[in-house]
Amino acid sequence: MADITLHINTTQLLQAARALNMQAQRGFIPAFSSMLRRRLVTCESAIKYNLTGSVLHRRSGNLARQVAFTLAEGTDTVTGRVGVIKQGPALAYANMHMTGGRIVPKRGQYLTIPLPAALTSAGVPRFTARQVPNAFFIKSKRGNLLLVRKRAGGIEPLFVLKREVHLPKRDYFTVPKNELVAGVQADIALLMKNELVLS
């Protein structure tokens, strides 16, 4: 999955705080929640950065818009979650970008891969193959099946048809996730150390 959920058992943290005779037990959990919020914001920003050209080139922006974080305090836990967690069209392919893999058609025999004439300058399809009036198929010199339309002076290739494509791995999530986990561990250690010094 393209998200991580951290469940921090605050009961255990409070027990450790009591064992160390910490003076500020009441402020311990809010201080930890504040630290976790900062870490989640940083992780969210790092993932979005990776989705805007560092790892993946931004096209529609759907994937970056679905990255978010949540933070909830319970009676004995603080739970933080970050990643592709908002509902939207990118959930269908968020994990495929991270792991890479084979894509096959859900319906029909072929995937319709848009060619430059069917794309915007950002690389987003302008229309689907079904939306092209008076289109017809030809075979290219390389043997690929193309969906084309007539234009002044010849034909314009719009889509190439493939039985499957292989998407390369573009892991935009693992590095920010690992930095989040390491940062939270460091924050807990720092919070415990600071409380020990105060007592």
Image: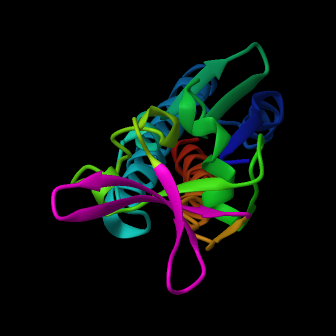
Indicate the quadrant containing the C terminus: top left, top right, bottom left or bottom right.
top right
Q: Position of residue 58 (x, y in %)?
A: 34, 54
Task: Relative to 192, say whether 31 is above or below.
Answer: above
Magenta stretch, main secondary structure, is strand
Viewer can see residue 185: no
Which one is nearer the viewer's eye here, 51 or 164? 164
Between 47 and 28, the one lying in front of the other is 47
Q: Which of 101/115 is in front?
A: 115
| Residue at horizontal 52 percent and vertical 49 percent from the top | 194
Residue 58 falls inside the magenta stretch = no
The residue sitting at 63% across, 47% down in the picture is 93
Residue 158, percent across and down? 39, 56
Residue drawn at the location 61% of the way across and 74% of the way down: 168
x then y, percent, for residue 92: 66, 39
Query: Whole-percent x and y of residue 123?
Result: 32, 55
Which span is picked out in magenta? 136-163
Q: Is residue 131 left or right of residue 29?
A: left
Q: Is residue 25 visible?
A: yes
User: What is the tally of numbered marks visible in this picture?
Assistant: 0
- Depicted 118 relative to depicted 199: above or below: below
Rendered residue at 63%/19% (across/down): 72
Left or right for 185, reference 13: left
- Asked if the stretch drawn in magenta spans residue 143, the answer is yes
In which quarter of the view is residue 44 placed?
A: top left
Which residue lies most toward the top here?
A: 75
